[in-house]
Amino acid sequence: MTSSASLDALLEEKMKFRENDSQQQTDVLQEEPSASAALPPGMQKSQDTSVDDLLKEMSRVPLFMTSLDEVGDDSGENVELEALKALAYEGTRAEIAQNFREQGTELVRTEKRYREAREYYTKALNALKAPPVPPDPEQGPQVVEIDEEAELQKERSIEEVCLVNRALCNLEMKNYGSCNRDCAAALRLNPKNVKAWYRAASACLALDKVAAALDACQSGLSFDSQNTALKSFMTRIEQRRDHLAAVEKTRKEREERTRLEQATLRLALMNRKVLARRTDRPLEMPEAKVALDDPLDASSTLNIPVMILYPVHAQTDFIKQFQESESISEHLSYLLPVPWDQNNEYTTSNVECYIETIEGGLIKAGKKLSLLKLLSSGKLEVVDDLVRVMVVPKGKAAQWIEDFKTRRGKQ
């Protein structure tokens, strides 16, 4: 394997070779040698090495590495690189952790590479938890004086900073739960850490935990009342709190109005003796809705959606607002004749109307009776906010009724 020293020697030999080669080119203008002199072994090796091979050799030296892939020799090992990696774990726990912390901070400050930086902060924190490295027996006994109290304080300081910085990485990566956990761990070490309070407040606000965000901000300001960042962020939190309060107020008012409207409608139906029920499988018709002209006045006009069915020809019409005082004939006057009626069977005077009863039978509906008169008879009901009226030509009514009864009997 080519080491850094051997690579320097190789480059130096190449420079000397180039100087000698320049001198030889000057001499060649005067006379042409009969034979080339042999180069020294080291220079001959350099001369025979291609540019690609030279770059490959250089890539194994940590100084010139551009990638960690395929940087070993034929056996896959790289002594220089492994030595550099080992250096990262030499020294006291505080020194090892500080090394990782600095690498993480550099990634955040210069490149905003939060994911990679978070890994370095994690390595630093893990280094602080690792047991002391036992002495190397080959180096013999060593006497190292360490101020344990000072070393412990240094470790706590590094741990606090790494936790707060890792919280920043998690905040930028939208890992709000992890951010809060790191802030909480940092605050257990130092409750006065304003950065931890600020980042905890940021994570809480991102989750719309406004109360927790306010609490974090207020806690930070209790230690640094003039902190500009916290004061500005407190304003943002208060604005979000007020907005959410307004949204919640609107929601409650809407729910309360809906409740009152429904209660008023039930009262209106009860006063009119109109029966209504809902099924598990209503038609997907959002516009079909029983409603009062004034939703909060039970005495105002009641509007009931009506489906006009032409069962003989499998056709339909829909009346969104059929007022309680209106009759079927009033609506048939503009619905008939229908465009698909080739035989002119559907005229106001030539059709009969039927409505299915609560028991499943049929009742012949008077075309001139008001809808309320029909519904208040106690035999009919509004199903899923809809009344179905079947319109049949008189000449085909008897047969259609028989077919209806047969189908009901089979069911």
Image (cartoon, helix red, strand yellow):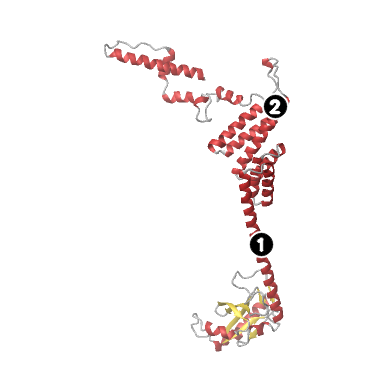
Which residue is most to the front? 226
Residue under circle 2?
151
Residue under circle 1?
249
Disc 2 residue type (three-letter): Glu
Look at the numbered discs 2 and 1 and tell me whether their residues touch, using CB distance below 8 Å: no
> Can residue 2 be seen by looking at this rendering?
no
> Can residue 375 be seen by looking at this rendering?
yes
- The picture places residue 63, in percent across and down from the top left corner, at 51, 25
SS assignment at label 1: helix
Quarter occupied by residue 365: bottom right
- The picture places residue 125, in percent across and down from the top left corner, at 66, 33
Q: In the figure, 137 relative to 186: above or below?
A: above
Q: How many marks?
A: 2
Q: Of the two numbered discs 2 and 1 on the same chain, state the one appearing first in sequence.
A: 2
> Residue sitting at 59 percent across and 43 percent down?
172
- The picture places residue 51, in percent across and down from the top left corner, at 42, 24
| Pick the front one: 403 or 293 | 293
Crowd rating for badge 1 (residues with CA inside 10 Å; few <14, some 14–19, many 20+): few
